[in-house]
Image (tube, helix red, strand yellow):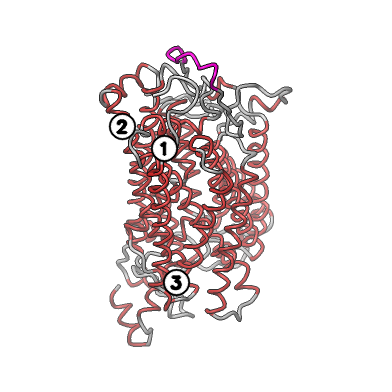
Amino acid sequence: MTGSGGLVATFSVWDYVVFAGLILFAAGIGLFQAIRGRKEASSEEFLLGGRQMTAVPVALSLTASFMSGITVIGTPAEAYMYGTAFWLFVFSYAIMSTISAEIFVPLFYRLSITSTYEYLEMRFNKLLRVIGTSMYIAQTALYTGMVIYAPALALNQITGLDLWGVLVATGAVCIIYCTLGGLKAVIWTDVFQMIIMLSGFVAVIARGAVLQGGLGKIWNDSYHGGRLETFSFDPDPLRRHSFWTIVVGGSLMWASMYSINQSQVQRYISCKTLTQAKLSLYLNMVGLWVTVSLAMLSGLTMYSIYKDCDPFTNKDVGASDQLLPYLVMDILAEFPGLPGLFVAAAYSGTLSTVSSSINALVAVTVEDFMKPAWPWLTERQLSWINMGMSVFYGAVCIGMAGVASLMGNILQAAMSIFGMINGPLLGLYMLGIFFRCMNSTGGLVGLISGLTITLWVGIGAQLYPPLPEKTLRLPLSVEGCFAPDMNETTTITPFSTVLQTTTPQPRPALADNWYSLSYLYFCPVGIIVTMITGLIVSAISGGCKQEKARPELFIGKSDLICFGCRSSDSEVSDLIDEKNPKNIQGLENQVFSDNEIALKDKDYKEKITKF
């Protein structure tokens, strides 16, 4: 291992072979799904996999979508520099899964929607649907740019892979299997990529344990270095990570991502039964637990190895996001192919997220903008439009990588974006499904108010980062570093994810209180402002006197029963739109049922009898 200056090794031929082979295999899955399903080239098949998916692949895909390259590289660096407080997100994942599975899955499943923003038009009006879709498109394009840019830049500086060449190649691979294979290709590719990502973590932990003399030594070093102080019950809302900020703020932030974010909802409504859809979320919860635990342990392994010679302080790397790639090249380079496996793991995370985003962006664009504008489009025309939009959004996301270069600490910046945009949107959905007195005027004013507040605090925090006493970065040492070779020059290209080491001057009065609010509270603030403002405006504008809305747009007691079991005829009748006998809302996905069963009178009666 190195003590200072330079890298131990660079990518070998075998590393390039392993990296390229795994990425090409992932693209091959998309091509296989395209060839396999070419006879079923409907828009429904492309966007939702024909609603015939089962829980396990969907769960792995949900987890892989969360595990972007940002997560693979950023989360271990978080444990290395700040300790294991981030592990408390396991509680957030449990709360998020319960909220999503027991409240939102029955609602979206019953309505059989392709775009989650269709609900906003059903419950409120067309304008709110357009605004919601536009917010999602802007957020997802920016986030996807970050997902492509950050790992590519970090790995470029560590491995020497050409930066923009890799960016374009990443987008091109995603475009290929999204364009040709649709959602099925995305899900099955995610399953493969999930295995690769976890293998990358395991390789780092196993090799680190061998070098350090066992996991016990890693744990002991982490304890003495203050990395295991996980539980902090400090109620200060300005504290970056505490039990309260993560469990309260983090739960709502992740709930906004899994409950109403098109990228995630599109997956679980592709399941063929409601039971499978709910089960996919609970299995995804376990997958998230495993993922964050392995990422934390990778970070602790890195700390045990570099506790006396921090590469970041010693300027061997230019940013925290480069720490894990640096470690990989340091400890795995003597095993040809393993660094290639890790780089493939980071890029698998990037590919899975980018492909998910492209597929979801196509879905909302087609469903929320194109179909309403041109209702006469045939299935064949829609299929061509889907493919064309996949190429378009792939190019947009590559372009947004340039904007992402202006962002700060990449893991935190990604979550901040979700909090700022999804918080107000989740507040609007909660108003719609729980409060019958809500009207469209209240919804519009509430959404705009919530978004204004979250953008204010979020942009302010980006311009004036919190002071070090609120972020609580743990100490690192360079006492064990070797003296650098004066004949060797190491060029470190600075980039945006370098941690803030200086305090910008001057700082406005709000910088040390309002702008220093924990980024995990952006989402709760957006929810609260949206709901309070929306309810007040609705009350003033006659929301309680409006016509009674359709009952299926609200959450009932039967929706909250685990796995959506229905026991009475009255409950069944509540789920059926009398004007449209095809709307059978039970354990089977209604569109799947429509595809498989000719709903004639006899079949329809038999279906009801089953309940």
Which residue is label 1 attached to? 89
Count neighbours of disc 2 (C-alpha within 10 A) and say few if under 14, some if 14 to 19, many if 20 or more. Answer: some
Query: Measured from the top left, where is residue 530 in percent x and y?
Result: 61, 47
Residue 269 or 64: which is nearer the viewer? 64
Q: Amino acid at mark 1?
A: Phe
SS label for mark 2? helix
Q: Residue at x 59, y 65 (%)?
A: 365
Query: Measured from the top left, where is residue 324 in percent x and y?
Result: 44, 33
Q: Is residue 154 left or right of residue 185?
A: right
- Furthest toward the front, the residue is 487
Q: Residue at x 60, y 50 (%)?
A: 139
SS label for mark 1? helix
Q: Amino acid at mark 2?
A: Arg
Which residue is label 2 attached to? 207
- Furthest toward the bottom, the residue is 601
Q: Is residue 584 left or right of residue 322?
A: left
Front disc: 2 or 3 = 2
Instruction: Estimate the spatial distance between the alpha carbons at disc 1 and disc 3, rounded to whole Å.
Output: 34 Å
Residue 457 lies in quadrant: top right
| Res. 595 in view | yes
The tag on residue 45 is 3
Q: Tags 2 and 3 in contact by the CB under 8 Å rule? A: no
Q: Which residues are magenta?
A: 478-488
Which one is earlier in the sequence, the residue at label 1 or at label 3? 3
Which one is earlier in the sequence, the residue at label 2 or at label 3? 3
The C terminus sits in image quarter = bottom left
The N terminus sits in image quarter = top left
SS label for mark 3? helix
Front disc: 2 or 1 = 2
